[in-house]
Image (cartoon, rainbow, N blue to C red):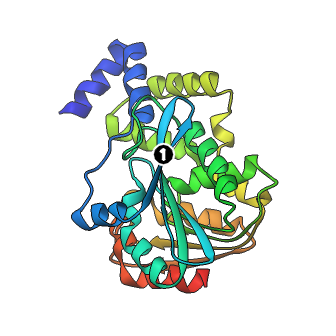
Amino acid sequence: MKKLLVRIASNLFPNQITSFAYNQLSNPQVRKLRENEITTLEKANKEKFKFKGFDIQLYSWEGGEKKVLLIHGWEGQAGNFSDLIEKLLIDGFTVYSFDAPSHGFSSKGKTSLFEFTELVGVLIKKYQVKLLVSHSFGGVATTYALFKNQDIQIEKYVLITTPDKFIERINDVSEMVGINDKVKNLLINRLEKETNNDVKNLNVSEFVKSINVEKSLIIHDINDKVIPISRSKNVHKNWAVSKFMEVEGTGHFRILRTKEVINSVINYLN
């Protein structure tokens, strides 16, 4: 019913509905953490980091000489990696993570892919890490950050599900909200004007062709209902240094809590 109303309103009030859709893209909804996720965050050393008017919540867990940065997805947060963090610590890794602008325990406000991306680049340099793990949209932010910072050298990078084309994200939001093509085009024009970027060129499968990563592993569930596996397969096809691992029965979010996946990530980073 709500989608039908939005579709009708898209024809009657295209500018207002464009603003509504834009807010969907720039105001992430934060999911509630599980008890074990909170417990893991409580063990961390915490720091507030000033960035673009936001107070960014940083986390670090001391574990050993090997250092890894974890990059969560859109509407995610550092705590989502709790199962992986606990295993990384046992295996002698020092772990860094963060809550992106307007995510988790960072301060709230309108944000975008581009602020998320810029922060990732800043934090890779701050922590001087050579190992990365991202989930979902974190793969877009990270590959774009590496594309924009050609001086960054990464040894191993694990992408636990990844989108590919940013236009696909807009199409997904358009379908979810119920906006028509006219409003979608107005939304794209607004995004391009405000960010000075051509949305059609924001593709992970293009970024990976020229980033400085020695080895990568992409893991994706064959029945992921949030991001179809075809999108990360296209990234793999365009990334000479990547390996691909299919899993089943984990979905898009539970993949971060699946023993098989966690063990595969640890073994790969080691």
Q: Nearer the viewer, residue 229 or 126?
A: 126
Label 1 SS:
loop
209 sits to left or right of 265: right
Rendered image quadrant of residue 87: bottom left
Q: Residues within 10 Å of mark 1 (few under 14, many from 20)?
A: many
Identified at 48% across, 53% down, the residue is: 98
Q: Where's the C terminus, which quadrant?
A: bottom right
Front residue of this view, candidates 45 and 224? 45
Q: Does residue 164 show up? A: no
Give percent across and percent down for residue 244.
59, 77
Residue 55, horizontal then vertical, whole percent = 47, 37
Residue at 66% x, 64% y: name it. Answer: 129
Q: Position of residue 89 (x, y in %)?
A: 47, 78
* Image-based side of 90 in relation to 127, left or right: left
Q: Which one is in front, 152 or 21? A: 152
Kindly identify the amino acid type of the residue bearing the numbered disc 1. Answer: Ala
Looking at the image, can residue 25 be seen?
yes
Horizontal side of residue 120 vs 83, given as left or right:
right
**Residue assigned mark 1:** 100
In which quadrant is the N terminus drawn?
top left
Q: Residue at x 35, y 13 (%)?
A: 13
| 52 versus 166 height, above or below | above
